[in-house]
Image (cartoon, rainbow, N blue to C red):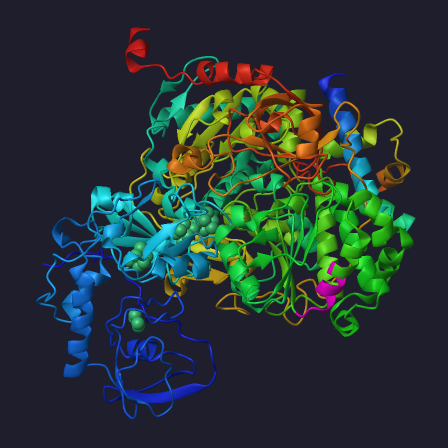
Amino acid sequence: MRPTQAARLIKEVDFGTPIRANEDMVALTIDGVDVSVPKGTSVMAAAMTLGTKIPKLCATDSLEPFGSCRLCLVEIEGRKGAPASCTTPAEAGMVVRTQTDRLAKLRRGVMELYISDHPLDCLTCAANGDCELQDMAGAVGLRDVRYGYAGENHFGDAKDQSNPYFSYDPSKCIVCNRCVRACEETQGTFALTISGRGFDARVAAGPTDFLSSECVSCGACVQACPTATLTEKSVIAHGQPDHSVVTTCAYCGVGCSFKAEMQGDRVVRMVPYKDGAANEGHSCVKGRFAWGYATHKDRITKPMIRAKITDPWREVSWDEAIGHAASEFKRIQAKYGREAVGAITSSRCTNEEVFLVQKLVRAAFGNNNVDTCARVCHSPTGYGLSQTFGTSAGTQDFKSVEKSDVILVIGANPTDAHPVFASRLKKRLRAGAQLIVADPRRIDLVQSPHIRAAHHLQLQPGTNVALLASLANVIVTEGLVNEAYVRERCDLAAFEAWARFVAQEKNSPEAMEEHTGVPAADVRAAARLYATGGNGAIYYGLGVTEHSQGSTTVMAIANLAMATGNVGREGVGVNPLRGQNNVQGSCDMGSFPHEFSGYRHVSDDATRDMFESLWGVKLDREPGLRIPNMIDEAVDGAFRGLYVQGEDIAQSDPDTQHITSGLASMECVVVQDLFLNETAKYAHVFLPGASFLEKDGTFTNAERRINRVRQVMQPLGGKSEWQATCDLSAALGYPMAYTHPSEIMDEIARLTPGFRNVSYAKLDEMGSVQWPCNDSAPNGTPLMHIDRFVRGKGRFMLTEYVPTQERSGPLFPLLLTTGRILSQYNVGAQTRRTDNNAWHDEDVLEINPFDAENRGVRSGDLVALASRTGEISLRAEVTDRVQPGVVYTTFHHAVTGANVVTTDNSDWATNCPEYKVTAVQVRRTNQHSAWQEKNLEEDVSLRRIATPELVAAK
Amino acid sequence: MSADERNVAKLARMAGQIADFFRAYPEAQAASSVAEHINKFWTPKMRAEVLAMPEPGDPLVAKARAFVRTGEK
Ligand code: SF4
Ligand code: SF4
Ligand code: SF4
Ligand code: FES
């Protein structure tokens, strides 16, 4: 008998050294077999293309060859000695032999030396079965160690266990340098060195240990280590995995592919997948290590209901919970009207789940009140790029950065928020590309090992549009416009209007300096560099979108790229760095209140006809409520019922007290989530969600890349979200019949032109695909707008700087801006339930030494942070990363409540909240704020779960 | 301020922000663009509230109101 489905451990091929991209090929003979490889490829890699594994220890194909172990020796006709195959490039006509008696003897000699200083505890070693040293000992036929084991050795060296996820056992180190090189070449952090020489040479993470070093726990060194020296603690605890499944990280918008390496249905480790196009084998601490939340004891796995939010929760069956939710929604609609209910979808959920929720709203609720959390992050990207280019997405793939010459990073902090992309970016910068950073804060990229920004335009929060106008002014008035490009590709009348507009004196760097605070000379130099430095690429994040002029800024960025001819080929483009894993997807899936999937307005009759005929129901042609509108109308009493899937608006959305008073006014709030999150305190029905490990589906990353999410364990709550949504819809009177998420994707493909050729079969075959993927681009579209813009001619938009209404003044003299850090993720519901807290266990307020001194504040002091909307207390960190007049914090911890302070100001076009500018005051304090006290109390009172005995006794 | 008044004031502020963007354009185009934006993104109820406002403070919003559609339901 054979097993039905071969569950196997996926092992990518290791060519030993990188395969070079080169059109020129060279032909050679290896062990009598002809082979041709791209010029620059090593003999080792050439041999591997034939399947010939030359023994190796210091080489692996994610790293440049190093040539230290001398195990990979070969014989080459006409050459003396035995050169190392990893450092010898293949040449035309070479005749190579990889196995001879002489080579075997040499290799055994090398191995003997290694093994004489290596503990022989293979049977009890965590790497047993996954150790290259062990493999090599086998491959070279090592039978005896002539030197014995009694000589000088490192067996007694102390382990470094400081990192919560991996351990360093120096006694097993063979000093191959792979970890050091991985940290430099792959990750770009330069945390590791080899200290000492000869026998004393050891790997060192700074002067103390891994945790207190520069190490960011990306795992690249662990991945590269051929021995047990650097090993995941989960492997030490559980042993080697026996099968693996390729899936996609559920954290940020980079969308890294991982192998979930398993024993049964237990995840042993997550290993970045080399064939994943977004990450090519790299990872960050979140995806690589912070997955323990998925089985955390706080997971709620039983559906629950309650009549009032002050009642304790009562565990019920799925049928009862769904039935209750449906009858409440029906009751509310009967009483207050069809528009009185709606739903919020999540960028943390799959495309299929998001699509179903919007379908439920449109078909079963009969209105368009569906919005997605992208509302509060990248909605201005959608609006701005569709106005200018005609499509609501970034223009490039991540790989494109390898061809960039000048990189402008504006309002983004990639090393913290998009770490794996940041590693690619840093690699390109180390290779010589120039960097311009526009950010109020000195982010790490401005100056980090071997990287220094040519310009850091340290603007005042809220003045992006002013800065971009002055950059454009220089480009136009100094004659730096790429006229041929503009003439061919863009709408000329719009261009001329724009050129006249930006050329006005009021937009000059000198005039704008008063608003931005950036010296005019720096702006001029940066503009010249971007316009004339070769391929110019712009990367931006929420520091662009989350402003009252967020959409204007996106358009200003697009203008700049068009004017300099920087759209439509590799190395250039306008690239939004998306926050959450599926921001792109949740927007694509039609979960905006005015749009069907593929960004088609609900008033478009042809589109609506198509949906109506497939769904068999009449659809509303008027836009529905956006999240902030829902909350406003809830406070107002018109909006009474909400279904929230995988979102935590009570923590993530601005002006918390406004949000919670909206939620508290509703009669039925249904929360579907992994945990009893902040929003669930205001909920009446709780439906257990499923983690990304528990379901099938797809995520679409910032490059428009659709990646598969694959189930590795059963949903802890018994149902995946899509199943619960189907059940709820059926209970509302609109049954949806799907047996697998692939059928949902098939429906998406039928209804959405850009997805026409997408299917699970296609994704299985290709690994991933970037939309549009249809008959004109059957294998997807890595780069957009190549010969023409999607909208035809690129359209320049006028982008007048309008200062935000949120101004500092005597009462609130400082400007607060918010952001993220590497180890925590958004509201922190996942990462706070992992050991990532070792790096960041509370939100702190960064304040400049000048402002701190004025207020008598020292690092570590508790301070009150107050704005017009609310007040919180948190610890201060005095740092010159922020300029005088600006303070900064993160919003990862619910107990801090950073959004109590932010306001309900929002982007003019999309209502994306202005998280990045709030006028505040800071003073020393010795207590929690009133809101924090109340919140702590409600953490208990609004989260009680009735114990079954009490319920029975009642 | 009642919740209702607060909402109306907020809608007026939002409409003013939209007008701020389009003010850079020639006036006739600006007014219709403001209205187009509101028609495209606001619910019929929100539009009705804008139409029902006593004279909005912003002259461009006032002009744009001529092009704001009431909902067809
Ligand atoms: S985990 Fe990453 S950052 Fe830390 S030492 Fe290893 S490679 Fe460097
Ligand atoms: S820790 Fe591992 S990768 Fe680093 S030098 Fe030692 S054996 Fe090589
Ligand atoms: S970079 Fe983003 S997608 Fe990749 S592992 Fe980290 S959090 Fe996950
Ligand atoms: S693998 Fe070539 S020298 Fe180590």
Is A812 placed left or right of A479 in the picture? Answer: left
Q: Is residue A843 above or below residue A446?
A: above
Residue bounds of the magenta highlight: A526-534
Give A336 or A113, whichever is nearer the viewer. Answer: A113
Give the total number of marks visible in the rendering: 0
Give A640 or A68, whichever is nearer the viewer. Answer: A68
The location of residue A896, given as percent across then percent down, is: 54, 25
Residue at (41% x, 63% y) in the render: A762
The location of residue A106, given as percent across then percent down, is: 19, 76
Give A859 or A309, whichever is nearer the viewer. Answer: A859
Residue at (36% x, 78% y) in the render: A42
Is A582 placed left or right of A282 in the picture? Answer: right
Task: Please identify the quadrant where the C terminus of chain A is shown.
Answer: top left
Residue at (90% x, 49% y) in the render: B28
Q: In the rendered image, is residue A695 in sight?
A: no
Is A262 placed left or right of A648 in the picture? Answer: left
* Quadrant of the rendered image containing residue A871: top right
Q: Is residue A541 above or below residue A324?
A: below
Residue at the top extreme, as displayed: A954
The location of residue A135, given as percent across then percent down, is: 19, 64
Give A544 or A426, whichever is nearer the viewer. Answer: A426
Q: In the rendered image, is residue A317 in sight?
A: yes
The location of residue A359, given as percent across then percent down, is: 52, 42
Q: Considering the whole magenta stretch, tell me its main secondary structure.
A: helix
Q: Is residue A926 above or below residue A452?
A: above
Is A860 placed left or right of A64 in the picture? Answer: right
Asked whether residue A567 is drawn in magenta, I would say: no
Task: Please identify the quadrant where the N terminus of chain A is shown.
Answer: bottom left
